[in-house]
Amino acid sequence: MEQRISLITLGVSDLSRARAFYEALGWRGQEVQETVFFQAGGLGLVLWGRDKLARDCGVEDGPATGFGGIALAHNVRSEAEVDALLATARQAGATITKPATTNPLGFYSGAFVDPDGHAWEIAHNPGFPLAADGSITIPDFDNL
């Protein structure tokens, strides 16, 4: 298996609400057959009904509350961008779960959950510089 993620699909309880939330963050989606697709750098973010996603994955859908064990991360180029994006997310309907702060490793980050409870970290990490297209390359930690 090649080391790559092509699509991340978020199971949502209300597709219209979820699409409106991400579009309020400045994303632009396309809806096809009750599924919304966003181009997110070199991969796709997909919004799909939670029950349909569970059924398609062959798993039983459970309550949509609590931490699901996954956090999505969006790295930005400055601390000011972290603050601005958290403010935009709050205005769009997110719940800020961790105000931005500098951690002991030296990067600045905060977190929110979207209306369906999906956790997002917004971070400025000088050790993970962004390319012009927004992509990151994981550093070779053995040679740091």
Image (cartoon, rainbow, N blue to C red):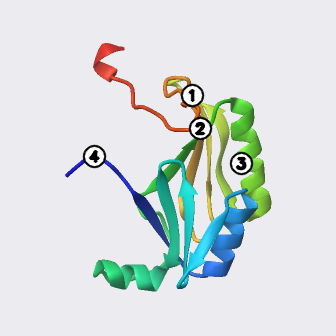
Comparing labels 4 and 1, the label whose residue is closer to the camera: 4
The answer for how far apart the CA atoms under marks 1 and 3 are is 16 Å
The answer for how far apart the CA atoms under marks 3 and 4 are is 30 Å
Q: Amino acid at mark 1?
A: Phe
Q: Secondary structure at mark 3?
A: helix
If you read the primary sequence from the N terminus, does the residue marked by circle 4 or circle 1 appear first?
A: 4
Residue for point 55% across, 31% down: 130
Q: Position of residue 9 (x, y in %)?
A: 45, 67
Q: Amino acid at mark 3?
A: Leu
The answer for how far apart the CA atoms under marks 2 and 3 are is 10 Å
**In the rendered image, the vertical position of residue 16 relative to residue 85, given as above or below:** below
Structural crowding at the residue carrying mark 1, measured as other residues with C-alpha within 10 Å and reported as few (<14), some (14–19) or many (≥20)? some
If you read the primary sequence from the N terminus, does the residue marked by circle 3 or circle 4 appear first?
A: 4
Residue for point 65% across, 72% down: 19
The answer for how far apart the CA atoms under marks 2 and 4 are is 23 Å
Q: Badge 3 is on which residue?
A: 86
Structural crowding at the residue carrying mark 3, measured as other residues with C-alpha within 10 Å and reported as few (<14), some (14–19) or many (≥20)? many
If you read the primary sequence from the N terminus, does the residue marked by circle 1 or circle 3 appear first?
A: 3
Q: Quadrant of the C terminus?
A: top left
Q: Quadrant of residue 16?
A: bottom right
Q: Badge 1 is on which residue?
A: 107
Residue for point 63% across, 67% down: 29
Q: Are marks 3 and 4 in contact (CB under 8 Å)?
A: no
Q: Badge 4 is on which residue?
A: 3
Q: Are marks 2 and 4 in contact (CB under 8 Å)?
A: no
Q: Are marks 2 and 1 in contact (CB under 8 Å)?
A: yes
Q: Secondary structure at mark 1?
A: loop
